[in-house]
Image (cartoon, helix red, strand yellow):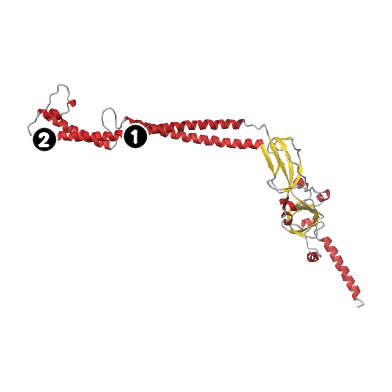
Amino acid sequence: MRYSRPVIGILLIILSVWVIVGEQMSGASADAVVNAPVVTIRSPVAGNLTIPERQLGGRVTQGEVLASIEDPIADRVRLNDLLMEVRLEEAARAQIATLLAETSAIRDDLDRRADIFRTNRLEELRTRLTHARSRLAILEQEQATVPDPRLLDAVEENDQRLPAEPRLDALVLDHARERVAILQIALGAAQQGVFLGDGYNDAPNAEQRSVELRSEIATLNTRLAEANARLTAVGERADRERLRVNSQIGGDLQSPVTGIFWDVLQADGVNVQRGDPLLRLVDCNSTVVTLSVTERTYNDLAVGQPARFRLAGSSEVHDATVARLAGSGAAAIYQAMAVAPSQQHLERFDVALIVPALRDGGADNCVIGQTGRAFFETRPLDSLRGLFN
């Protein structure tokens, strides 16, 4: 018992030294800050800017209207020229379509007349052939008996005889047979659509004209297809130009991210030029933790390595992951970040962490600028911290 108190005291001293040294020697950051990239909204066109009054630091959501631009003197000359070309192409197409319809109507009427001619011509040939066969039968019957001159005169077609030509009974009979044969040939040809006769070739005039119009209609169909293609091409060019003009006229400027209304770079009502910076927003969905560490700790880190982060004034520790190792002289990286580094930060080695818990809350949990500490190694009191948490 006499030696137990000194031994216990020595052990407590050793434990205390171990805890102090372990806590101080463990890899930790000197200054960790919740940070996020800044999105700059620029003017898409030249025009007059209108910015509604809004509190700096207010929350914005993606797609929310932040400002508007209107250009009262947008250039519409090219659009007007293209719209005129569209109207001219429409007029040309309408003219071709009208001519095509009228030509088709004329062709249909000619086809109707040709059908009427064909039907009646066939009926005529059948009738003439029937009577010609009847006359031939009468002549052949009378030829076998005593010829009757009066009968021959009745059945003979005198219009086929030359003036002062003597009439011979044998010739009359041969001529009747010839007429029957010719009519049979003409009827057979007509049934196949070919008409034999004087004053026309193989088809009536209406049918010949209809054939010519079919060629014209084919040409008009080709011209109409070409006119449609030209109208479509000019219409597409006009649509693209209309979109360009509409984009130059201006419109509402919407927030591209969910985050914080960070800064106003132009006053309400001023005239801005295309590309001028107007507003700055903080993208809370891309929140990171930026910090600096010593060279010894930095050399032990690797991208993807797990880490832990605790906000100042809070006992809750969040899981994190090493996302970037920028090293020394990382000032250029912070040009597009919300919180710039201090001079002491730049003298050490820069590290960036991804903390999922800080991103899940969106704009309502966007704690940009808050400080804390990051830890990369196990510390002696971590078990006690976990017990109390």
Q: Are marks 1 and 2 in contact (CB under 8 Å)?
A: no
Q: Which residue appears at 74% of the width and 44% of the height? A: 280
Residue 9 x, y percent position in the rendering: 90, 71
Front position in the image: 260 or 51: 51
Q: Is residue 321 visible?
A: no
The quarter of the rendered structure image containing the C terminus is bottom right
Q: What residue type is disc 1 on?
A: Arg
Relative to 24, residue 287 above or below: above
Q: Is residue 5 visible?
A: yes
Q: Which mark is residue 141?
A: 2
Q: Which mark is residue 112?
A: 1
Front position in the image: 121 or 201: 121
Residue 112 x, y percent position in the rendering: 34, 34
Which of the 4 image quarters holds residue 265? top right
Q: What residue type is disc 2 on?
A: Gln
Q: Which element is circle 2 on?
A: helix
